[in-house]
Image: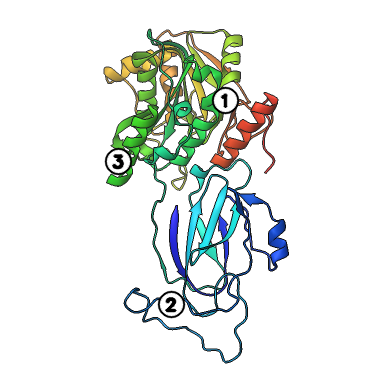
Amino acid sequence: MEDPVIVQNTWTIADDWGSEDRCPSSDSDAKDSAKVDDLEKCSSMVGKAHKQILASKSHSNFSSMQPTRKTTAEPKKHYPFKQGYLAIAILRVGAEGIHMTVDGKHVTSFAFREDLEPGFVGEVRIEGDIKLLSVLASGLPTTEDFEHVTDLEILKAPPVPTDKSIDLFIGIFSTANNFKRRMAVRRTWMQYDAVRSGKVAVRFFVGLHKNEVVNEELWNEARTYGDIQLMPFVDYYSLILWKTIAICIYGTNVLSAKYVMKTDDDAFVRVDEILSSLHQVNISHGLLYGRVNSDSQPHRDPYSKWYITSEEWPEESYPPWAHGPGYIVSQDIAKEVYRKHKKGELKMFKLEDVAMGIWINEMKKEGFDVTYQNDGRILVEGCEDGYVVAHYQEPRQMMCLWDKFQKTKRGNCCNE
């Protein structure tokens, strides 16, 4: 990323996940600083003579701009800008950190925080006693710039077995502009051996965006990674139930999964522990596995996100259901959801996790032998040691959890 930035006066710079650095005031400090991408963190002082750096009128659009401050005394050193005069700064994102040049001279570099990857840098802030006159952005990374992804092959979805028979299919709710979250999932728990070997398949279920450019980027991302199922509607919260149905269809009709799981793109899933738990439970028919809520009531507060009118659900309580960050159904339940959907027999209910509980309850009335398997290690919010699913995890936290798992092979949380 290179951003020519026209600025005046002093400065500081920080990336949204990196540390905020200010260059040292002496050359001796700079010599001792570590390197970032083989560049010194802070170059030597500049501006000894403080000659006015303005192009002639015939070579620059800025030639008519005069210094904003007149001084009669000998000008002081300023690092890296001269007080009151124009300067052009270029910011560049490298593999290890962000680098800045001013008027063609390298001034400073600073490293990303630990575990931060360049693909997750989404914002640069410039602060301090400066006057920002203009910004020209060029070479900004977008979701279609996949040539910058050095490990692209290991991030692509592996092929499913030729007979399409797998142990577990995981469908992830995501939205078009959640590229960072999808990349975090691809780089973390989608790297489990069970996923890479094809024993478990993972797909993102994403609706369209109102912005055509975002949709083009999403389509390029889908073609590149092969792990996105595009939904034929613009994403709204009231329509997420259709993603649940689509996950059931994909897991049983496109694939032949023994179990079908639903989760979110901000959830860290311990795939190894999920498979181990399902093996221990050893129930392949009529299973709802998750953080089961057996005694909940509809929200009747009109200001609640989960507000349900008496017309939508007249009863005082819901049948048992499992919380949305991570629940699993056996193949027969997923197939029955698909069958009822084709016949128009599914009750449409805007709370998708509760809706699954309602559907399963109807199946139970029709003769299904249903087992509700509760697992408190599937967390609705945050992370606790020993988790199976940790929810509301930002990309940086996902990378940290994956790093801890690789080192300990346990579900340890990150203390941030």
Question: Taking 19 as reference, is 100 left or right?
Answer: left
Residue at image position (34%, 38%) is 218
Residue 179 image point, x, y percent: 43, 40
- Residue labelled with disc 2: 54
Residue at image position (37%, 27%) is 226
Residue 234 image point, x, y percent: 30, 39
Q: Nearer the viewer, mark 2 or mark 3?
A: 2
- Residue labelled with disc 1: 291
Picture layout, residue 149 above or below residue 141: above
- Residue labelled with disc 3: 216
Residue 269 image point, x, y percent: 56, 27
In the image, farthest residue toward the bottom: 72
Q: Could you tell me how far apart the alpha carbons at marks 2 and 3 are, in whole angstroms? A: 41 Å
Where, by quadrant of the figure, is residue 379 drawn?
Answer: top right
Picture layout, residue 301 above or below residue 164: below
Q: Could you tell me how far apart the alpha carbons at marks 2 and 1 are, in whole angstroms? A: 66 Å
Residue at image position (45%, 43%) is 305
| Mark 2: few/some/many CA within 10 Å (<14, 14-19, 20+) | some
* N-term-proximal mark, 2 vs 3: 2
* N-term-proximal mark, 2 vs 1: 2
Asked which secondary structure carries label 2, the reply is loop
Q: Nearer the viewer, mark 2 or mark 1?
A: 2
Q: Could you tell me how far apart the alpha carbons at marks 1 and 3 are, in whole angstroms? A: 37 Å
